[in-house]
Structures are given as C-alpha cells and as structure tokens.
C-alpha cells in the first residue's frame, strides 16, 4: 500500500514485508518521545498539538516503527487523518499513546482501533500529570475493560518506557463494541465478506468514501450510530476506572485560566514579550554579540586570518579578496554566521523551546483567536507565526496544522512578508534599540499595520472563511532543561548547516560583483529607488542584493553603514518586508506551488519598497 494523497505532503511505502509497529494517539500526547525511545531517532518534542505533521519512520528490532500525526479518530476528513488512517490500516501492532489526564477524550480513538481488530497495547502516558490533577485510575480494571494491556508511563522522565518495550509482544485484539450489538455485528460480518478485512469493513460502515470506492461499494451511513455506542462504552469505562476528579482550583489551573482570559492574558503576554525583548534584544543582541562579533571576530579572528592568508596569497589578488576581502568568505561570512547571528539564533531557540514546553503557546493561540479571525486565520495560526520568528522556512512547513488551504495561503504570505526570522530579528533589534523608543515604536507600528492590512485584504479577496479554533490546552509544565537544550542545539546546528553555505555563496557573489564593477552599476541603477524614494545611502543597494540571498544576510549588511536614525528605521522596515530567503522560497514552492510562491516573492518586493518609501516621507 502506498500512503499518498494528492493534497498531502506525505509519501510512504507501506508495502515492505517487515512488521509494522504504529504509534497512534490524539494530538500532543507524547508519541514522539516513544518514537525517540524505540528507534533512537530524534524528532521534535513540544507541549503543543501538531508537533508531528509527517509520518516518521524508524527501526526497532524486527519492527518498522511509524509515528503518525495526532488524530481524534480514524477517518478521512483531512489530509493528516487520511495519512494516519492508511498507516494504521497497515499496522501489525498499534501502540496507542493515551493521555491519562484526558482519558475520556482519548479512549474514543482507542475503542475505534480495537473495533478495527488490530492488536493494541496502550501506553497510559502523563501519569504524573494525572496524579497532580487528583485523578486516580484503576489500571488493571482499565486493561480488563478494554481487553488489552495497559502500561502506565511518564514518558518525559522515561518512567514506564522499558516496561512498555518489554510488553510489546503482549499486544492483542481487545473487546469490540460489536460483540454486544447483534444488528451491527451482522452488518459488519456482511461487509467483511465483501472486503475480507475487518478494518476496511468497519470504516466503510462508518461512511469512509475512499475505502468504499476502493471496493466499488457505496459508503454506509452508520457513523452516528456507531459513534453513539462507542461514546457510551467509553463513558462506562471512565465511570468504572477513574475516580477522585480534581476541582480545578490548583495554581496551574488558575494560571491557565488567566492566560486565556483577555483581561489578564493580554498583560501576561505583553510582560512575556517584554522579558523576551530584554533577554534577546538587549542582553544577547548587544552585550553577547558585542563580545562575540566585535571583541573576538573583528578584533582578534579577522586580523589573524588576514595575516595568515596574506603569507601565501598576494593581498592584491582576486583570490585574496574572495577569501579575506571586505566581503570575504573567511572574514565577512564567518563573522556574520558565528559572531553576529549564531548567538542570536541560540538565544531565540532557547527561549522559544521554553515557551513550547511550558504549554503556553496553545494558550496564546486561544487568547488571540478572535484577532486572527479578522485576518482570515484562527488562533492556531499563532503557532507558525511565533515559530516564524525562529525560522520562516520551518514555520512554513508548520502551516500544515491549519484547517484549510485558504488559511495556509494567508499564513504563508504573512510569514514571507512581515515576520523576520531570529537571525534577522536579532540584527534589527541590535540596530534599532540604540535609536530610542520613538523609532522602535515606528518600526513595530508599521510592521503591524502592514501585517493587518495584508491579512485583511487576503481575507476579503480569497473565497471562504476561517475555520473554528479546535485546540487542546495541554497541562502547564515546568520545561525540562534537557529537552530545551537538546532542541536548541539541534535547531542551532541546523541553522549553521543551512545558512553557512548560503552565506559563502553570498560572499562570492558580492565579491565578484564588486571586483567586476557591477555592484557600483547596480547601486547607480537603483539609485532612484534607494536615494530618491527611500532616501538612503547608495551603499544600501548592496544590502538589498545580499537580502535576496537571505534577509538576515541583508540586515547584517546594514550593520556597518553610517546612517541617521530615520534612515536606519526606513532601511530596517524595507529589509524586513523584503523577499523571503532562498530556502523559504523553496519550501513555499513545495508547500504550495510555483505560481503562489512567485506571487509572494514579487508581492514582497512591491510592498517593501512602497512601504519603505512612504515611511521615509513621514519621518
């Protein structure tokens, strides 16, 4: 079976003969930790729904281990569900990861998998959270009611994982709801004769049109009846196994309510953003970067490397200028990547990981839902938007968690237009902070205005409307420092791998343009725009050329130019709205298509220079 859907981005061969162990669960139940543990392959682990958007594949003993996107049921309502459905249908064993805090919700999916006749073992995860919330769960009774093994786990601390691994061979088919409902049992048996597969037969009874079409059958219409019986069965199990419900008056419950209430949530969000500004924009962008870029790379490293290279290569040669010139590979590119940008990237990902793991991000989504609805999005879009401040390329992929194609188009355009990545943001904050509050507010106001107007415009012209926000609020947790550092390390290393070669390429291009005189020609050619319209020095054209390669590369190019506060503000607004970097464009083409990606690229050019020029007129 090939798992591939025309609107999805997933393609996976399920026809190999190895046994398949499939991890299944609702969103944000911790499946990725189990995948990491079984296969040794790291995938992102966060405390918000939608972390896993692809099928991830690994090996454990004789098993091919497959991690699926979080789903609430095996069905075919959207791309993620179709992909998860096909993988679950091919499973030899399902490890169903269940959130002990939300047992009533999660067991609905569990019962459906059991009804499909697939051998199941349950990892009852987040037992520590359940205990903190005052929940007492009778594990043996739960196992008896479902007819499958149940292993209590707290995956984040590794508790129960070895027991689960040792119990995989105990997975078995549980007690189906069809065993006690004769009429439905007969219908399932009849459908089974036509399909020879209980899994297919059940989903056709539940009205799956794709599977029915595969057998040239008409989808049946028993979904509501089956769902009602399944719901009733789950409610009975909950009554029998769960006791001592918490009254919701704990400190975390109170803080959680404050975070999503606009009266208290907005001030909390503003305080959080201010703290992030002080830590990243002031401490890291000025103090730390002052040490790494100026004190080390500019004053120690660059003189050393110039002296070293000059001993073997004549200083006036093209090779020398390519390596150690003003835009040299071993001077400018190295200093920008490691001295200027890397400290900012590390700082941003560190604090973003804390927000992710604490469970605050879904609450921000709930808080801003109404605001984003006016832009054609819903609160869930805040997650790719916040991730975009780390890396627009990664955030563009995350837009898959949005509910419709229309929302993805709007989100991707806004990401490409008005969201600066961490490296670019760090340079911007470092340049604008010394100018004072006035210019900082102008910069923020203009970016917000462009963001809101662009979103509102797209919301008006694109057909359809935003979908409702359906997002689970995970428990608030104190982030695990090990996971935070691990994510920061992996993402920072990924930044070097992605940005390093592109900066080298940019250094080569700029040096060639300079040595051939083309750079001066470009500066003169675009002078009516840079000097006449934007009122900036002609050398800014070089930064824009660098910005075509990467926007943070272009922003870094502004770092050494002598400009007035007004000119700096105009230049920063323009470079922020400038075209998405090469990597982001490639992902936009992959996620959407050439037509939409090209429209975003040219739209960014137009918007950046029009807005930059208008700001130059008024400040």
Image: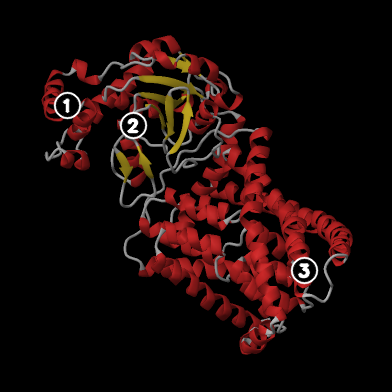
Residue 535 image position (x, y, % from top left)? 68, 85
Dot 2 surroundings within 10 Å: few (below 14), some, or many (20 or more)?
A: many
Q: Mark 3–mark 2 contact, CB under 8 Å?
A: no
Between the residue at mark 1 and the residue at mark 2, the CA separation in whole angstroms equals 17 Å
Between the residue at mark 3 and the residue at mark 1, the CA separation in whole angstroms equals 73 Å
Label whose residue precedes the other's in the sequence (3 or 2): 2
Q: In which quarter of the image is residue 220?
A: top left
213 displayed left or right of 75: left
Residue bearing the label numbered 1: 196
Label whose residue precedes the other's in the sequence (1 or 2): 2
Residue bearing the label numbered 3: 436
**Residue 360 appears in the rendering:** yes
Dot 1 surroundings within 10 Å: few (below 14), some, or many (20 or more)?
A: few
Residue for point 65% across, 68% down: 506
In the depicted view, which residue is nearer to us: 268 or 43?
Answer: 43
Residue 68 image position (x, y, % from top left)? 41, 36
Give the SS element for disc 3.
loop
Give the SS element for disc 2.
helix
Q: In which quarter of the image is residue 504?
A: bottom right
Residue for point 36% across, 10% down: 144
Q: In the rendered view of the protein, which quadrant contains the N terminus?
A: top left
Q: Mark 3–mark 1 contact, CB under 8 Å?
A: no
Q: In the rendered view of the protein, which quadrant contains the C terminus?
A: bottom right
Residue bearing the label numbered 2: 88
């Amino acid at each position: 079976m090939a798992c591939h859907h025309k609107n999805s981005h997933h393609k996976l061969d399920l026809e190999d003969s190895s046994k398949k162990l499939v991890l299944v669960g609702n969103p944000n139940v911790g499946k990725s930790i189990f995948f990491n543990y079984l296969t040794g392959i790291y995938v992102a682990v966060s405390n918000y729904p939608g972390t896993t958007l692809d099928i991830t594949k690994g090996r454990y003993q004789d098993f091919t281990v497959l991690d699926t996107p979080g789903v609430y049921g095996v069905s075919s309502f959207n791309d993620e569900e179709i992909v998860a459905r096909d993988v679950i249908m091919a499973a030899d064993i399902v490890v169903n990861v269940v959130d002990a805090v939300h047992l009533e919700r999660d067991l609905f999916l569990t019962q459906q998998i059991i009804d499909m006749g697939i051998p199941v073992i349950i990892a009852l995860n987040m037992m520590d959270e359940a205990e903190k919330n005052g929940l007492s769960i009778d594990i043996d009774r739960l196992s008896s009611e479902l007819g499958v093994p149940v292993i209590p786990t707290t995956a984040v601390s590794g508790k129960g994982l070895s027991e689960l691994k040792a119990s995989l061979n105990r997975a078995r088919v549980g007690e189906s709801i069809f065993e006690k409902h004769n009429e439905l049992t007969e219908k399932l048996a009849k459908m089974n004769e036509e399909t020879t597969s209980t899994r297919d037969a059940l989903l056709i009874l539940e009205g799956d049109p794709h599977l029915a079409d595969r057998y040239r059958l008409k989808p049946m219409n028993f979904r509501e009846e089956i769902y009602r019986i399944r719901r009733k069965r789950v409610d009975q199990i909950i009554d029998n196994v769960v006791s001592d419900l918490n009254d919701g008056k704990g400190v975390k419950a109170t803080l959680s309510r404050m975070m999503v209430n606009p009266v208290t949530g907005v001030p909390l969000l503003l305080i959080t953003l201010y703290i992030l500004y002080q830590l990243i924009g002031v401490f890291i962008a000025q103090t730390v970067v002052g040490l790494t870029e100026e004190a080390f790379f500019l004053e120690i490293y660059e003189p050393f490397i110039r002296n070293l290279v000059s001993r073997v290569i004549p200083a006036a040669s093209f090779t020398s200028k390519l390596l150690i010139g003003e835009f040299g590979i071993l001077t400018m590119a190295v200093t920008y990547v490691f001295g200027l940008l890397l400290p900012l990237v590390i700082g941003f990902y560190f604090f973003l990981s804390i927000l992710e793991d604490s469970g605050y991000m879904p609450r921000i989504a709930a808080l801003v839902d109404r605001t984003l609805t006016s832009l054609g999005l819903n609160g869930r879009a805040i997650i790719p938007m916040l991730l975009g401040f780390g890396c627009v390329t990664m955030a563009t992929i995350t837009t898959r968690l949005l509910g419709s194609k229309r929302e993805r188009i709007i989100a991707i355009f806004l990401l490409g237009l008005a969201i600066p990545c961490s490296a670019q943001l760090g340079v911007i904050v470092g340049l604008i902070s010394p100018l004072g509050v006035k210019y900082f507010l102008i910069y923020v106001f203009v970016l917000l205005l462009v963001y809101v107007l662009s979103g509102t415009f797209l919301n008006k012209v694109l057909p359809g409307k935003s979908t409702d926000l359906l997002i689970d609020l995970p428990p608030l947790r104190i982030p695990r420092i090990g996971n935070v550092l691990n994510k920061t390390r992996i993402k920072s290393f990924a930044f070097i791998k992605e940005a390093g070669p592109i900066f080298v390429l940019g250094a080569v291009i700029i040096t060639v343009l300079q040595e051939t005189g083309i750079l001066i020609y470009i500066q003169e050619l675009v002078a009516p725009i840079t000097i006449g319209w934007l009122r900036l020095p002609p050398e800014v054209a070089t930064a824009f050329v660098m910005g075509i390669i990467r926007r943070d590369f272009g922003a870094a190019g502004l770092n050494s130019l002598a400009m007035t506060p007004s000119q700096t503000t105009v230049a920063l607004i323009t470079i922020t709205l400038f075209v998405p970097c090469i990597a982001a464009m490639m992902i936009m083409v992959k996620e959407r298509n050439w037509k939409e990606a090209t429209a975003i690229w040219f739209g960014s050019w137009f918007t950046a220079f029009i807005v930059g020029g208008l700001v130059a007129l008024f400040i």
